Amino acid sequence: MSASLPQAYKTGHQDFYGRDFMVTPDVLIPRPETEQIIDSVLNLAGKSYLPGVKPAPRKLPQNPTILDVGTGSGCIAITIKKELEEAKVYASDISEKAINIARKNAENHGTPISFIISHLLKNVNFTPNLIVANLPYVDENWDWLNKDSLSYEPEIALYAKDHGLKLIKELISESTSRQIPYLILEADPCQHQQIIDYAKKAGFKLIEARGFILCFKY
């Protein structure tokens, strides 16, 4: 029996970091684990992401430039701008349909964000202080994978070759060539050690691992 249409696509809405975002089958449904990217960004900015938790020392500039690669619905970029108003936020995606959804979400939330249609950093002509990315990282051959449950979401936003690591490795290499100061990636924990090893060889140092999230410094 095939899976039924996900509730988020039925309603056209999904919550992310306490805010409502419009979603369609042109974009991935935002997941709770992705919210940890926001926590890591706030940590780098020297801001507490949990009540009563002392913030870490600020590592980003006072007015950082942040790029969200593979923005999809725009939930990450928009949330970063909401939580870190002083940041200049850019968002890129290879899918024009996804960019259109992200633009609408940015308008709905009143967030000024610059959008770029690009494969990874190909059309990005500046050097951000921080790149965040929830790229496709699902390996189609994972034994535990339930493809039916993902059948309504865009394959381009889910699956990647090289055991799910192709695009992540490409982004690490491109970020290294541009000497990007900080890089935050989402991936399945089973992939983390491979990513850490690859990033280390490329010149990145792991500074935080949290759930599905890896944070690197160049």
Image (cartoon, rainbow, N blue to C red):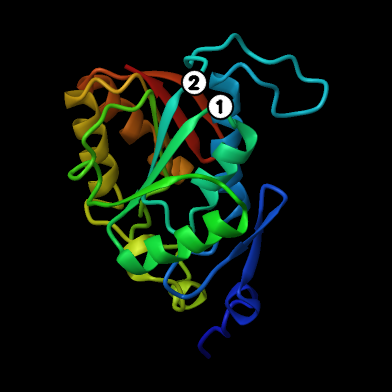
Classify the position of the C terminus by image quarter: top left
| Residue wearing tag 1 | 86
Residue 122, how many percent across, how many down?
A: 17, 44
- In the image as oriented, which residue stretches furthest toward the right? 52
Residue 214 appears in the figure: yes
Q: Amino acid at mark 2?
A: Asn
- Rendered residue at 57%/77% (across/down): 9
Nearer the observer, 182 or 33 = 182
Q: Amino acid at mark 1?
A: Glu
Q: Quadrant of residue 94?
A: bottom left
With respect to residue 133, does 195 lie above or below? above
With respect to residue 208, does 104 lie above or below? below
Q: How many marks?
A: 2
Task: State left or right for residue 174 relative to residue 35.
Answer: left
Residue 31, how many percent across, how many down?
A: 58, 55
Q: Which disc number belongs to residue 1?
A: none
